[in-house]
Image (cartoon, grey):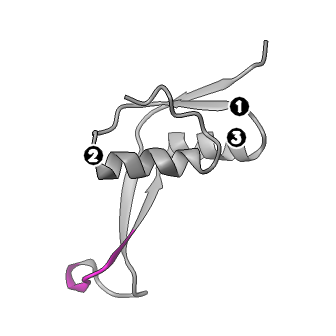
Amino acid sequence: MTNSIVCFGEIMLRLCPLTQFERLEKTHALKMDFAGAESNVAVSLAKLGHPVSFVTRLPDNAIGNAAINNLRQFGVDTRFIR
């Protein structure tokens, strides 16, 4: 049996202006980054070669799907995300 790691918690969405030093209220274009302590740990462990699953609850919309895809691109198992 293979040992695996399960991380659970929230994923945060960070919105930043595309242009450096532009204020959020004055920008028309935003960059999306997903982060959060728990998801950062899951991604770091996956990048080190450990089998990692992430458990959380996300909305069933484009932003929730983007968060799931972000985790998947780093090799995190997302089948337990509801």
Q: What amino acid does circle 3 point to?
A: Leu
The residue at the point 75 percent across, 19 percent down is 3
Q: Nearer the viewer, residue 51 or 69?
A: 69
Q: What amino acid does circle 1 point to?
A: Pro
Q: Which of disc 2 and disc 1 is earlier in sequence?
A: 1
Determine whether, in the image, residue 8 is placed left or right of residue 51: left
Residue neighbourhood size for the residue with mark 2, other residues' Cα within 10 Å, grouped as few (<14), some (14–19), many (≥20): few
Closer to us: mark 3 or mark 2?
2
Q: Position of residue 30 (x, y in %)?
A: 33, 74
The residue at the point 22 percent across, 86 percent down is 26
Residue neighbourhood size for the residue with mark 3, other residues' Cα within 10 Å, grouped as few (<14), some (14–19), many (≥20): some
Closer to us: mark 1 or mark 2?
2
Closer to us: mark 3 or mark 1?
1
Secondary structure category for the residue under label 3: helix
Q: Which of disc 2 and disc 3 is earlier in sequence?
A: 3
Q: Quadrant of the N terminus?
A: top right
Secondary structure category for the residue under label 2: loop
Residue 33 found in image quarter: bottom left
**C-beta proximity under 8 Å, tags 3 and 1:** no
Decide: is 53 above or below 22: above
Circle 3 is placed at which residue position? 45
Circle 2 is placed at which residue position? 61
Q: Position of residue 65 (x, y in %)?
A: 38, 46
**C-beta proximity under 8 Å, tags 3 and 2:** no
Which stretch did the figure color magenta? 25-31
